[in-house]
């Protein structure tokens, strides 16, 4: 496809992408938009031109605080909207070329949470990450717990503290146990960490008692975002037994503003790691369910340029999204449009592909050196963590932009 919109070769937002998000300008309230090159297209103004008339979409759907109502129209409609936009952007005679207030520079708009997140679940699906954590904190000879290769392990997190890229967070406080001590004290965390993850957004609801089959799971997934699951490792170490993550995770998570649809990612499918032992039938699948998505994490200190500290890939995930969703709903748990499921930390086999400071520094024993000469065991006040992701194949690039947040001092 060739578009009349100027797009640089390394742009995440090529004509093959067309991701959806929620934006606003100083003159307009929040609206549904798509990203193309350096621009945001206002789908409210586009709809007024009549190019979606055959789809019978109410205009108000595009002037909304969240994408939930748009996504609820169903994939036959949302996929057609995406296709129509692609066709119009490749048509030299398109009305989009002469319409008013349709294009804005991305740097001139404000981006917002793309969906109203009702529920949020975080998985633990990278075998490399789970193994590294097991070696550090349990038994190096039996790093994985007995259930890990049988079920996509996960926990229900806190949706209220999920923030859009650009919103800064504060260092959390909590109970920690200092070295060589038996009892906890209450203080600010000294081991704030990032977790490199990706999330998928639910695009179709179920009713309680229903289960989503492994074969139909992708019908319920609208698209994907970048996800930074902020963590306080010292709080986590004390609290996670016996029920798992709580305050060490719930203080903040950050997501990228643009939802990249599964249709845009289809050409980047790959096979995942071999799963042994054989999974139970409800988790067994055919075809390629993983995606080749290049990922990186940078740290930018208050005084200095950013340094890439991790380069990983989503294809490393042991449990794929279809398995995660099939397992999540196997007990009849209902899901709703806008629910968010996160992958868990994405780590590869090489040390530079680990997806957290916990692994990269091996619990602080091997500090990372930044480009300005400073060293980091964990994230320090006024550090900015930036995550980016993109797919590229046969000259076609589809990217996610970035999720970026600065860690501020503890809030008094």
Image (tube, grey):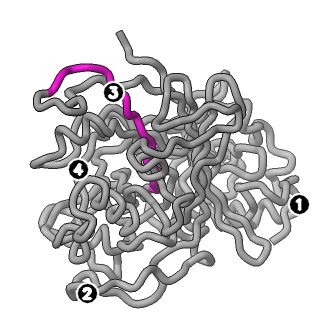
Task: Single out the mark in the foreground, 4 or 1.
Answer: 4
Q: What percent of the width, then of the height, locates residue 200? A: 43, 58
Q: Callout 2: 10 Å neighbours few (<14), some, many (20+)?
A: few
Q: Considering only order in the chain, which callout, 3 or 2, is on the residue closer to the N terminus?
A: 3
Residue nearer the viewer, 82 or 303: 303
Q: Residue furthest front?
A: 180
Q: Considering only order in the chain, which callout, 2 or 4, is on the residue closer to the N terminus?
A: 4
CA gap, disc 4 and disc 3: 22 Å
Looking at the image, is 72 positioned above or below residue 212? above
Residue interval drawn in magenta: 184-198
Residue nearer the viewer, 164 or 33: 164
CA gap, disc 2 and disc 3: 39 Å
Q: What percent of the width, then of the height, locates residue 134? A: 28, 60
Q: Where's the N terminus, which quadrant?
A: bottom right
Residue receiving disc 2: 277
Residue receiving disc 1: 93
Residue receiving disc 3: 189
């Amino acid at each position: 496809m060739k578009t009349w919109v100027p797009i640089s070769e390394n742009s995440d937002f090529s004509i093959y992408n067309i991701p959806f998000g929620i934006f606003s300008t100083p003159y307009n309230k929040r609206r549904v938009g798509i990203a193309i090159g350096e621009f945001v297209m206002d789908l409210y103004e586009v709809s007024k031109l009549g190019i979606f008339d055959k789809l019978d979409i109410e205009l108000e759907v595009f002037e909304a605080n969240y994408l939930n109502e748009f996504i609820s129209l169903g994939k036959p409609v949302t996929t057609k909207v995406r296709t129509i936009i692609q066709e119009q952007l490749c048509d030299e005679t398109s009305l989009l070329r002469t319409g008013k207030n349709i294009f804005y520079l991305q740097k001139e708009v404000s981006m917002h949470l793309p969906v109203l997140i009702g529920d949020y679940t975080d998985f633990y699906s990278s075998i490399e990450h789970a193994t590294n954590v097991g070696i550090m904190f349990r038994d190096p000879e039996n790093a994985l717990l007995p259930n890990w290769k049988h079920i996509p392990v996960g926990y229900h997190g806190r949706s209220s503290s999920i923030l859009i890229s650009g919103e800064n967070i504060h260092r959390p406080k909590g109970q920690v146990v200092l070295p060589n001590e038996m009892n906890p004290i209450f203080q600010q965390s000294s081991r704030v960490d990032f977790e490199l993850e990706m999330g998928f957004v639910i695009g179709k609801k179920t009713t309680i008692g229903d289960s989503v089959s492994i074969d139909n799971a992708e019908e319920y997934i609208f698209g994907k975002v970048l996800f930074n699951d902020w963590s306080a490792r010292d709080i986590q170490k004390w609290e996670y037994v016996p029920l798992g993550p709580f305050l060490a995770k719930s203080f903040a998570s950050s997501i990228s503003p643009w939802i990249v649809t599964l249709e845009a990612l289809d050409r980047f499918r790959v096979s995942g790691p071999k799963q042994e032992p054989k999974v139970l039938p409800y988790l067994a699948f055919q075809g390629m369910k993983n995606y080749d998505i290049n990922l990186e994490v940078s740290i930018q200190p208050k005084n200095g340029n950013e340094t890439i500290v991790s380069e990983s890939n989503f294809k490393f995930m042991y449990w794929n999204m279809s398995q995660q969703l099939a397992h999540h709903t196997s007990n009849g748990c209902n899901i709703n449009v806008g629910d968010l499921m996160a992958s868990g930390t994405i780590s590869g086999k090489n040390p530079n592909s680990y997806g957290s400071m916990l692994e990269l520094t091996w619990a602080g024993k091997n500090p990372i050196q930044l480009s300005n000469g400073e060293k980091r065991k964990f994230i320090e006040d006024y550090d900015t963590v930036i995550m980016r992701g993109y797919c590229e194949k046969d000259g076609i690039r589809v990217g996610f932009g970035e999720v970026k947040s600065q860690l501020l001092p503890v809030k008094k």
